[in-house]
Amino acid sequence: MQIFTYSQEMPRTTPSAPARSSWSRPAGPPPDAQSSGIDVISLGRRIRHLRKAAGLTLEELGAAAGAAASQLSLIENGKREPKLSLLTQLAGALGVGVDALLGTEPPTRRAALEIELERYQRSPLYENLNLPKIRITSRLPLDVLESQLGLLRELERKMNEQVATPEEARRANGELRRMMRERGNYFPEYEAEAQKVLAQVGYTSGPLSQHTISDIATHLGFTLYHVGDLPHSTRSVTDLKNRRIYLTHNQRSDHDPRSVLLQALGHYVLGHGTPQSYGDFLAQRVATNYFAAALLLPEQTTVDFLQRAKTAKEISVDDLRDAFSVSYETAAHRFTNLATQHLGLTTHFQKTHQSGIIYKAYENDGVNFPMDHTGAIEGQPSCRAWTSRAVFEVPDKFSSYSQYTDTVTGTFWCTARTERSASGEFSLSIGVPYHHVKWFRGRETTARAVSRCPDPDCCRRPPAELSEHWAGNAWPSARAHSHLLAAMPPGAFPGVDETEVYSFLEAHSGS
């Protein structure tokens, strides 16, 4: 019997307490490198190797290729990707074809070691060490190069062992977020499937009613059953043998029952099979969440709404929420789906617990989210100066709170709200770089803060005066999170008791 289950609790992709973190951009090419998919580090090392083999200086190669020596230096160091025209000129000056420059194999063993060390030095792992970077030149002794790499490999291995079973989940989550960032969090294939379903049930415009959602389920061949004994570890259970979807009578207030049903249908529409890894499980969650949001806030209708708001310079997540009768979180997520693709706006989203720990995050605007050595953001503490933290102290809980924050990567404007759930109070914030704020309502705010993170003196270390009075004289009894010591839940659907689910289906199959 095939089933689709939807866990009632958030998968533990990260601990609830902060791991060691570094505040940096996601791993990848440096900010001034283009993102065409070319390995700029390998390309640079190959050009340097061929230049030296030809006995040319940077100035001589630059003169032959029509480029400044300083520009070639950046290219050789993997900090800039040459345009195709310059790449062709360089290949001609070095007497090789362009393919020889774009090869994947390093030209020598030493070059391979240099490339590996350079990649380590650009990773969150190295950023965590807070050490100066080694200048990689031909004068760096080979034994020093090998020794440094040996230490970094062993450190990475030990850090991976320390987090044990949650490591797979953290890495899978990080990879998934990087993919979302590269796509601007826009998935046309899910948009197309949602639009097809809406067209089949005759949807035209406006909020998606419960009646229309029931029509969608019927059109797809499913019967809905509301029960009082749904397995405690699930939000819904889909019986594919008898084409039934079971939902609870007592839906928790922090879960929109429409979304729960649409997510369950999404597994079927998108053709999901049993997850083969935790990465598959997370990817399926993202897909069904996206599909449900694309039904609740259809692409063209939502884009038209947002474009009108942009023209009026009145973009507001609150308005989007109200226009489609969805939660603020759903509206904020949907804005990230469409903002870059259709409005030309880069953005970031954050869901932060009142303790300061980030539960969910997305960015494609360069904001410096904290990350651990794997690149994971969830589980890290947000800066105290950020809007996502400041909003908890605002007395007015009815209106959204907006703030400008000066950070080490630029000035950002953010708007946030707080919402209470079974897991406590959370802030939900949407932000954009300063040059995009002119399109948003709330830009006139005078609230402003300065964040110096990752500098520990920004908000990690207590002020000197407090430390002088209390260091060594305080012994807090920490609130222990016993689940942090547990392994990831086993099974294809983590956290779901399959025996309980099968017993539930067996009990209801004859009804």
Image (cartoon, rainbow, N blue to C red):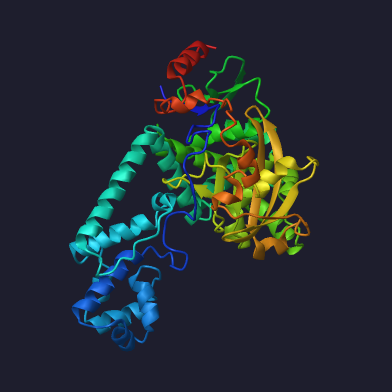
For the image, the number of numbered tags is 0
Q: Quadrant of residue 158?
A: top left
Q: Quadrant of residue 206?
A: top right
Where's the C terminus, which quadrant? top right
Residue 92 vs residue 215, the one in the foreground: 92
Where's the N terminus, which quadrant? top left
In the depicted structure, whether residue 351 falls above or below residue 116: above
Q: Position of residue 322 (x, y in %)?
A: 75, 44
- Position of 180 with respect to 357 (left or right) is left
Q: Position of residue 395 (x, y in %)?
A: 80, 40
Q: Quadrant of residue 409?
A: bottom right
Q: Is residue 233 visible?
A: yes
- Position of 286 with respect to 390 (left or right) is left
Please give the name of the residue rendered at 61% of the width and 39% of the height, measured from the top-left corner: 356
In the depicted structure, whether residue 456 falls above or below residue 213: below
Please give the name of the residue rendered at 36% of the width and 40% of the height, measured from the top-left corner: 159
Residue 21 vs residue 173, the one in the foreground: 21
Q: Is residue 276 visible?
A: no
Q: Position of residue 213 (x, y in %)?
A: 64, 34
Please give the name of the residue rendered at 62% of the width and 46% of the height, measured from the top-left corner: 464
In the depicted structure, whether residue 406 falls above or below residue 3: below
- Position of 375 with respect to 301 (left or right) is left
Residue 399 vs residue 196, the one in the foreground: 399
Residue 63 vs residue 439, the one in the foreground: 63
Q: Position of residue 129 (x, y in %)?
A: 41, 50
Please give the name of the residue rendered at 31% of the width and 70% of the height, measured from the top-left corner: 44
